[in-house]
Amino acid sequence: MKNIVILISGSGSNMAAIAQTAQDEDWRNQFGANIAAVISNRAEAQGLQLAQALGLATEVLSHRDFASREAFDTALMALIDRYQPALVVLAGFMRILTPAFVGHYAGRLINIHPSLLPAFPGLNTHQRAIDAGCTQAGATVHQVTAALDHGPILAQAVVPVLPGDTAEALAARVLVQEHVLYPQAVRDWLQTQP
């Protein structure tokens, strides 16, 4: 079984889109894939309730309980590895990961970012795209490397920037596309695995 572990920090809407697609398309039989767990660094993350409603195992490991980023990442790796993941999916996991963590999951750690990378890595992507006069924005699924919001691009979705757009309005339209793009990218990844 190709176990998938999804990491979240907030609402979990991308996690839910992936999990719902996995159930609707029967990834267990189609790809031998299973969402083994959803892990959050925040006990109050709304996505944990969504995951539980979808019948998924959930775990919480608070970064606040650790003295350093390295100590948290070491504990997080140990927790993730209990599920023997073929793939670790960052779905709104709002932590910068250490090189040791990224190296441990090299080639099987993916993220979604709300811009057309390599443009606008980091935060405030929608406002930055509007301020730069972009006519297009979007989302990118990429393999995670030690460099923030870099790594091989797996899939992108383009969203037009409309006249008078606000960051909030653009973000809402991009999120709709993320919910299509991320499950598709995970499915495509699974199809390339033996």
Image (spheres, rainbow, N blue to C red):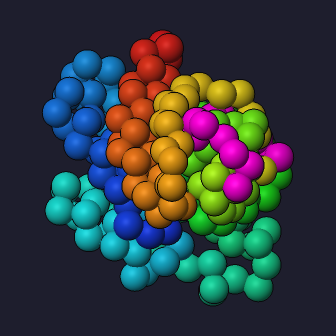
Image coordinates of residue 133 in percent, x first then y, are 69, 45
Q: Which is more toward the observer, 162 or 145?
A: 162
Residue 104 within the segment the image draws in magenta:
no
- Please give the name of the residue rendered at 49% of the width and 68% of the height, measured from the top-left corner: 9
- Please give the name of the residue rendered at 79% of the width and 78% of the height, measured from the top-left corner: 68
Q: Which residue of the protein is positioned furthest toward the front in this rendering?
A: 163
Q: Give the range drawn in magenta.
A: 131-147
Q: Which is more toward the observer, 18 or 70?
A: 18
Image coordinates of residue 105 in percent, x first then y, are 67, 41
Quick check: 35 above or below 59? above
| Residue 5 appearing in the image | no
Residue 144 within the segment the image draws in magenta:
yes
Quick check: 71 above or below 33? below
Q: Which is more toward the observer, 63 or 186?
A: 186
Q: How many labels does the image show?
A: 0
- Please give the name of the residue rendered at 82% of the width and 52% of the height, measured from the top-left corner: 99
Image coordinates of residue 45 in percent, x first then y, are 40, 75
- The quadrant in which the N terminus is found is top left
- Please give the name of the residue rendered at 64% of the width and 52% of the height, measured from the top-left corner: 130
Location of residue 77 by image quarter = bottom right
Quick check: 135 above or below 38? above
Image coordinates of residue 101 in percent, x first then y, are 73, 53
Location of residue 3 by image quarter = top left
| Residue 20 appearing in the image | yes
Q: Give left or right: position of 18 versus 158.
A: left
